[in-house]
Image (cartoon, helix red, strand yellow):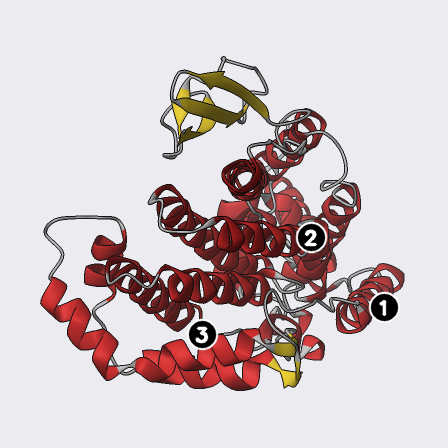
Amino acid sequence: MQDQPSRARMGIVAISIVVALLAVIYFAPTNDGRWAAMRRRMASSQDEAQERNVSRPVVRGKPIPGNAWDEYSLALNEAATFTEDSNLIRFINGDPTADRAMVDRLLAAHKGIVDHISQGAQRSNGQYPYDWNSGSRMELPPLLFSRRAASLAIAQARVWKEAGRPQDAVALLLDVSQFSRDLAANGPLLSHLIGVSLYSTTFGELRDLLLSGKLNNKELSDLARMLEIVDGNFPALAPVMANEVAISVETDIYPAPSLSGSRNLMKSSGWRYGFSSRKMVLDAFEKRDNYAQRSQNIDLVSFAEAMKEAKIVQAEVEASGNSILRQYGTNLPKVLANHRDTLSRLRLLRAATTLLATGEIPKLADPFGTDLLYRREPGKVKIWSVGSDGKNHEGRGSWKLNSGPDLVLEISR
């Protein structure tokens, strides 16, 4: 039987081995080759974002040389001077509890917002001047003020419609759609999501104006032509996913963790990353880059095919032991569905405008299916997209979000 000193020596040796192994893990540098490759890949992604051709025509009128954001920024600066966002949104949504007097005061006090959005929409260049080389520290457009400025402009269009100025209302809503496009195109995902959301609100207001019967045939024909331009410049999702690689987490903000930091990492991400947050960054970057590559055709394939891949990616993110990846991962299925939903609303508007102008319905692709569907009924025509389930429910649903399986626009005739 071993004596006590021998057992003690064996215990000390075992502890020493464990400490040595942990020290090796703790102080071991991250694979230099992979780290350098990550740096190069991030730099190339930044160059791609900077050099991407995102030129667009103006929706109405003739283009004015210059960058739209010179004007938009003035609108956003003015939007920072008030805070009555919720009342504007309630008014836009038709909530009877909205304070109309407050809306009128805001519109009277901030005419500059409307003017600057419209003037910016006429500029020939709509690209926000992102500093891609700043990576995750890159400055974004003020998103809160972007939403506030757009909401005020949409409220102004509503007031003009009510006052018998439907043409002015249409022009302003088209300008807001251009602002939405310039916010959503070739930027990071967060800017894209806000832009798409503003598109959706703008399309809802255009729908109400279209159904009001206040536009004559020429105005309807002009609107159909301009909506075709809006459709042709609707921002793609794939470049946005690629841009996320360009602004991945900066590596220099993740030094080797302290002992307490290591415990926290082990708790959130397991032993694999417990002693190297830099390895977590490397792993998260490589996976996000892989997801971006897998999303290259997301705008080109059918919704069913795109959603299948999006769900696979989302499942991988949620199952990952890397807390950085989980933290910065996006809900790609939801992003994809919202993107196609908004584009579907635009296509429905185009179809309805052409119907009212000419009596004919154009053949337009359904972002959720093959082509938009329609049915003539006594006194009305129903146009619909099959919606996110990809199944035709014979026009059962409405324009409202989540109101039915189909996304429907009904036109009285």
Q: Residue at x 48, y 75 (%)?
A: 118
Under circle 2, the secondary element is helix
**Is residue 333 visible to us here?**
yes
Measure the alpha-carbon separation of dots 1 and 3. 29 Å
Quarter occupied by the C terminus: top left
Q: Circle 1 sits on which residue?
A: 40
Q: Is residue 116 left or right of residue 159?
A: right
Compared to 44, does 310 lie above or below? above
The answer to which image quadrant residue 64 occupies is bottom right
- Residue lying at the far right in this picture: please name it: 33
Under circle 1, the secondary element is helix
Res. 338 mark: none
Q: Circle 2 sits on which residue?
A: 232
- The foreground one among 283 and 235 is 235
Label 2 with label 3: CB-CB less than 8 Å: no
Label 1 with label 3: CB-CB less than 8 Å: no
Measure the alpha-carbon separation of dots 2 and 3. 26 Å
- Which tag, 2 or 1, sits closer to the chain's start? 1
Amino acid marked by disc 2: Gly
Q: Position of residue 76 (x, y in %)?
A: 41, 79
- Which tag, 1 or 3, sits closer to the chain's start? 1
- Which tag, 2 or 3, sits closer to the chain's start? 3
Q: Nearer the viewer, mark 2 or mark 1?
A: 2
- The foreground one among 294 and 207 is 207
Q: Position of residue 273 (x, y in %)?
A: 64, 51
Q: Circle 3 sits on which residue?
A: 142
- The foreground one among 310 and 38 is 310
Q: Residue at x 22, y 80 (%)?
A: 108
